[in-house]
Amino acid sequence: MNKTKDKAEIIRLLLVFVAIMLVMVGMSHVVRPWFESREMELPLVPFSIVLYGLMIAIVLIYSFAKGDKFIESYGIKKIKVGTVFLTILLTFVSMPMGWFANVLSQVFVPNIFAQAADSLMEGSLLPLFVSMVVLAPICEELLMRGFFQNRFSKLLPFGVSAVLTGFLFGVLHMNLNQFCYAWVLGIIFAYVNRASGSMITSTIMHLIFNAVGCVVMFISAKVVEGAGMSVAEGAEAYRTDPSTMIVSLIVTGLLAVGSFFLTRLVIRAIAKKEGNEIQAKA
């Protein structure tokens, strides 16, 4: 009977995710083009607030209907200062795994972030920063780890739930390039949250990842500008050069292997710091 209930709950959660994706698709492929077709400006920050507001509203309605307590069910819990520093360390230690997934995806598809870089950097960078480095990490972690991971982990073995929510996190980005590294990062985020007992750890990591991405994009723009190219053109030239791609795959692949083992060590250290001895030994 419990297995039947669990399967029904998994299906309901997947339907909630479908509803969230419908909001994403509707806002990105219907609302935005509608404004653009009428030459009306759609500011990035208000657009992001409406988008994430609608998505979070869906999961909150579901949570309240189930009678869940928000703080407890979403895993919002204080972490120690030492854990904050370990989480920052973990972010940089785990980056090579994301790099490898990103490079590997570019064997098949362009770098989506680079393709959009030139339009994103038009005008003031503040809206881009607020949207990508503040709103996106906080809201996406609330959705993917706070809501989905914490619920799937009660219905499935933890490893399975981490892979599943990482997969859904990748799907949320709606393109193969970002899907690949978002899936990898989503799994890491799930494990660090289990170690700390709080979604604050994955939120910190997500904030730093996005901030680094913005900085790299800005530096790349300055570098390719000197060569008379756009960021998109520079990224595509890099991607279509076989020798460059082979070297990048080998280098990032080797770094990713080392990153995997170091990531495990830091996650165990976080578990120990938070007094989660079972996870520290896992």
Image (spheres, rainbow, N blue to C red):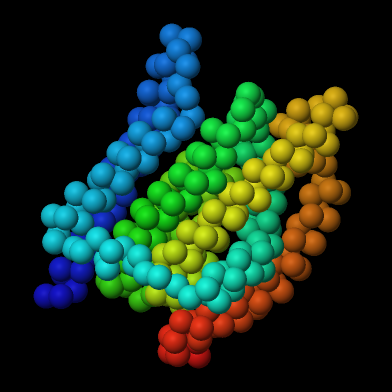
- The structure residue drawn at horizontal position 70% and vertical position 51%, both measured from the top left corner, is 103
Q: Residue furthest front?
A: 81
Location of residue 52 in the rendering, given as x and y in whole percent from the top left corner? 37, 41
Q: Report whether 33 appears left or right of 206.
A: left
Q: Which residue is at the front of the view, 262 or 92?
A: 92
- The structure residue drawn at horizontal position 13% and vertical position 61%, both measured from the top left corner, is 67
Residue 269: name its quadrant: bottom right
- The structure residue drawn at horizontal position 39% and vertical position 61%, both measured from the top left corner, is 145
Q: Measured along the vertical axis of the image, is residue 175 above or below residue 138?
A: above
Q: Residue furthest top?
A: 38
Location of residue 48 in the rendering, given as x and y in whole percent from the top left corner? 43, 35
In the rendered image, the quadrant that contains the N terminus is bottom left
Q: Report whether 227 appears left or right of 89.
A: right
Q: Measured along the vertical axis of the image, is residue 133 above or below residue 158?
A: above
* Observer able to see residue 105: no
Q: Which residue is at the front of the view, 55 or 10?
A: 55
Q: Which residue is at the front of the view, 38 or 158?
A: 38
Residue 51: name its quadrant: top left
State how many labels appear. Answer: 0
Q: Which residue is at the front of the view, 264 or 8?
A: 264
Residue 261: name its quadrant: bottom right
Location of residue 242 in the rendering, given as x and y in whole percent from the top left corner? 82, 46
* Observer able to see residue 189: yes
Q: Measured along the vertical axis of the image, is residue 237 above or below residue 97?
A: above
Q: Report whether 280 appears left or right of 64.
A: right
- The structure residue drawn at horizontal position 68% and vertical position 58%, both measured from the top left corner, is 100
Q: Report whether 7 appears left or right of 213.
A: left
Q: Measured along the vertical axis of the image, is residue 202 above or below residue 143?
A: below
